[in-house]
Amino acid sequence: MTVKEIAELAGVSIGTVDRVIHNRGRVSAETAKKIEAIIDKHQYTPSPIAQRLKRNRAYRFCALVPRRGQDSGYWGQIIQGIHRGTYEVEALGVETEVIEFDHYDIRDFRKAMEETLRKSPDGVIFAPTIQEISEPFVENLHKKQVPYVFIDSDLPGGKPICKIGQDSFRGGYLAGKLLHLFMGSASGSVAVLYAKGSYHIERRRDGFLHYAAEHNITTKVKNYIRKDRLILPKSEIANFLDKNNNLRGVFVSYVDVHQIAEIAESKRNKGKFFIVGYDLVPANHRLLKEGKIDAIVSQSPQEQGRQAILSLYQYVVLGKKINTNIEMPLDIYIQDNVPDFSNSD
């Protein structure tokens, strides 16, 4: 089916159909609904090659994410997925520029945001890691009518065309259940370590505490504030573990569980002590294989990056309706099923 045929069925001009397909210009709600029904019925998809020829230039996307080496290499996995998705659609007229920023440095974060806006991209992939400065950037995207996708984390009040990531609350709840299973009938308390100011990580904490409350498990809570590149000084972690010597397990709701696992190794040798963390980055992968971490919850970072590109492509280039929420599975890895790192997300 062609645009002309859709226009004839709807009794409107080709220009009106084009405005509905690309969400441009004013069309009455009744007319738009009629055209969308015809498009859905006949499964119309515009030709991406024709779209590019009409524009006479490629579609340009920007991916604004933390530096690939930060958070123990987690963001490097996201960027790999973005490159993978771009490779799938670059022959159809899509270019992607990855703009990396130091998300421990607010000034660098702002600089990267300003650079992204100056480029006037056709779409943006954004990881809103720091809420207070992400909000004005998102407002600017709204003003400029630039469609954007949230990746890895959410931002309350944001209106992305799509959110890609895990249900953080469910992830924390699952971590609580895993620790409970490891502990069995043993008595004692558990602890959760989380990053203050990171919305999705705080939601993991909430999910964990919810599970613990449901099952009458005594919990200790330890937070940190990201002021620099250090997470928590080793001495502070060691002091926390020593002061709470009845702990039978700890959930580290962020990527640097390997830091806690290395410090807690002597505690594990003295008795049963279990560690559950997040993200299958190299350091966590190694300690999981060695049995120094008991379980890792993974959120498929490479697939997140790939899905972000494909979602923007479908929405911006093809003018198609897309899933507004792509929820990543709660993948669980233990020592017995840890994959080769070259094959893992």
Image (spheres, rainbow, N blue to C red):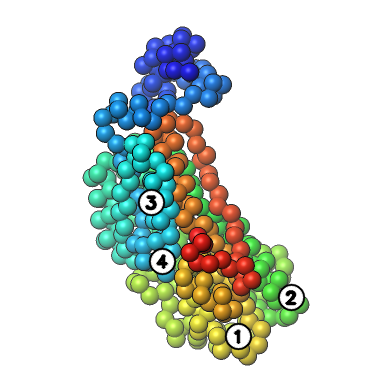
Q: Which residue is mark 1?
A: 268
Determine which of the numbered discs, if any, sits on residue 184 in the image. Answer: 2
Residue at the image point whose x is 42% and y is 50% from the top: 84
Report which quarter residue 228 is drawn in: bottom left
Residue at the image point whose x is 59% and y is 54% from the top: 329
Task: Please provide percent x and percent y for residue 247.
Answer: 62, 81
Q: Which residue is mark 3?
A: 83
Q: Nearer the viewer, residue 318 or 11?
A: 318
Report the Cα–Cα distance between label 1 and label 4. 26 Å
Disc 4 packing (10 Å; few <14; some 14–19; many ≥20): some
**First in residue order: circle 2 vs circle 3:** 3
Q: Which residue is mark 4?
A: 73
Query: What amino acid is at disc 4?
Result: Gly
Report which quarter residue 122 is drawn in: top left
Q: Please name which of the two marks, 3 or 4, marks the residue nearer to the observer.
A: 3
Report the Cα–Cα distance between label 1 and label 2. 16 Å
The secondary structure type at the circle numbered 3 is helix
As displayed, is residue 336 above or below residue 245? above
Query: What amino acid is at disc 3?
Result: His
Query: What amino acid is at disc 2?
Result: Gly
**First in residue order: circle 1 vs circle 4:** 4
Report which quarter residue 123 is drawn in: top left
Task: Please provide percent x and percent y for residue 229.
Answer: 35, 72
